Amino acid sequence: MLALREHDPERVGDYRLLGRLGEGGMGVVYLARSSRGRMVAVKSIRAELAAVADFRTRFTHEITVAQQVGGDWTAAVLDADPHAERPWGATAYIPGPTLAEVVNQHGPLPERSVRALASGLCGALTDIHAAGLVHRDLKPSNIMITIGGPKVIDFGIVRALDDPTHGGLTSTGLIVGTPGFMAPEQIRGERLTQDGDIFSLGAVLAFAACGHMAFEAPDGQARAIMYRVVNEEPDLAGVPETLLPLVQDCLAKDPSARPSLDALRTREETQYYYLGPWLPAAILARLGQDAAQLLEPEDPHTQVTPDPASAPTPLPPHAAVTEPARPLTAQVTAPNAPEHPASPSQRDGRRRRRKPAWLLAGAAIVAAGVLWGIGYLWSTTW
């Protein structure tokens, strides 16, 4: 998470902004906290997009439909205001890295992890398509990695930007989608159907399995990448042979040649029966750290101005008491401050008792992995 910038607002709707999660063609995504303390991701739409004729009407429709998407594999749409000066939408915040970050930092995922990823993404697309939506921008940075499986974010809203039945934004020169993960028909500007998401699924699985994009170009030149998507075969070097048929079928140039979601969910490559964790240990440890850090962000706009008359008498430097970080909603004074510095043995005891939150979370994840491993060995033995 990045710090808020000077021109960023303090609030969007009823949500207090804590920091920036990212920025793209549609706008800025913030980490925020609701009045009830829930952590959410708030996307604030760019002002120039909001000024496009009929955008707010279409945005309202897409948000309404997106709120109907349920299931275990997507981030729920919680709230929105299409009529604000800068329209915005809020979704449940999912702590953890994106698939792009995981692969870039840890390398390609093992085969069992790619199978589990494929299974979860098929479930997410099934829920999205059942609501009448097309994701249109399924890519590694829109897939969050959690202990329970992948979670798809940013679904549905992109259709409000380039729906050809309403004029869209293609006349502004804005390309809605990501080169290398867009289907050929999307690049050609043709009407996009749910088959386009199947192509994106294949590109995502190829990236996860081999660590590089199926369609690449020097220096990541967008036009060269899009040319290869339309005219050339994908580079699938590094994809396990057992997964090649699945990826190749999804990446068919002809939309009608791609398998349906129903067919994909019955294929052997998307069946996931592994009894242990679906991710390698190093990635599980990262997830534990991210979950613990979710408790740490404080409101960057809140300041405490102490009352000099009520300020406690400062302790000598060698007797200072360090308190854990707390929400800055009121001045906190430690009661019964010790009159004498603690002995070395007492200080050592306190240090032993104060375990970092991320260490406890990591230990819990390791313990869970050990238990899963024992269960797996027991099941295979008997």
Image (spheres, grey):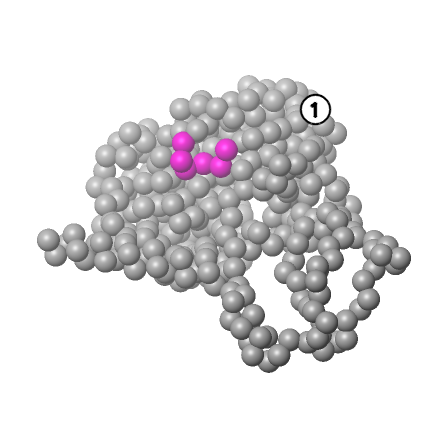
Residue 58 as seen in the image, left or right of residue 281: right
Q: Residue furthest toward the left?
A: 382
Q: Is residue 207 above or below residue 27?
A: below
Work out whether residue 290 can be spotted.
yes
Q: Residue furthest toward the bottom?
A: 344
Work out whether residue 4 can be spotted.
no
**Within the magenta stretch, is there residue 65?**
no
How many C-alpha atoms fall within 10 Å of the one at disc 1: few (<14), some, or many (≥20)?
A: few
Q: Which residues are magenta?
A: 71-76
Q: Amino acid at mark 1?
A: His
Residue at point 61%, 32% (across, down): 89
- Residue indicated by mark 1: 83
Residue at point 46%, 44% (across, down): 143
- Looking at the rendered structure, the secondary structure element under dot 1 is loop
Q: Is residue 75 above or below residue 294?
A: above
Residue 274 as seen in the image, left or right of residue 301: left
x and y percent of residue 227 in the render?
47, 44
Front-lying residue, 177 or 141: 141
x and y percent of residue 77 in the render?
54, 31
Front-lying residue, 182 or 118: 118
Front-lying residue, 164 or 100: 100
x and y percent of residue 34 in the render?
63, 37
x and y percent of residue 370 in the render?
30, 60
Residue at point 75%, 41% (across, down): 9
Q: Is residue 322 above or below residue 214?
A: below
Q: Quadrant of residue 158?
A: top right
Residue at point 48%, 24% (across, down): 68
Residue 314 as seen in the image, left or right of residue 171: right
Q: Main secondary structure of the magenta part?
A: loop
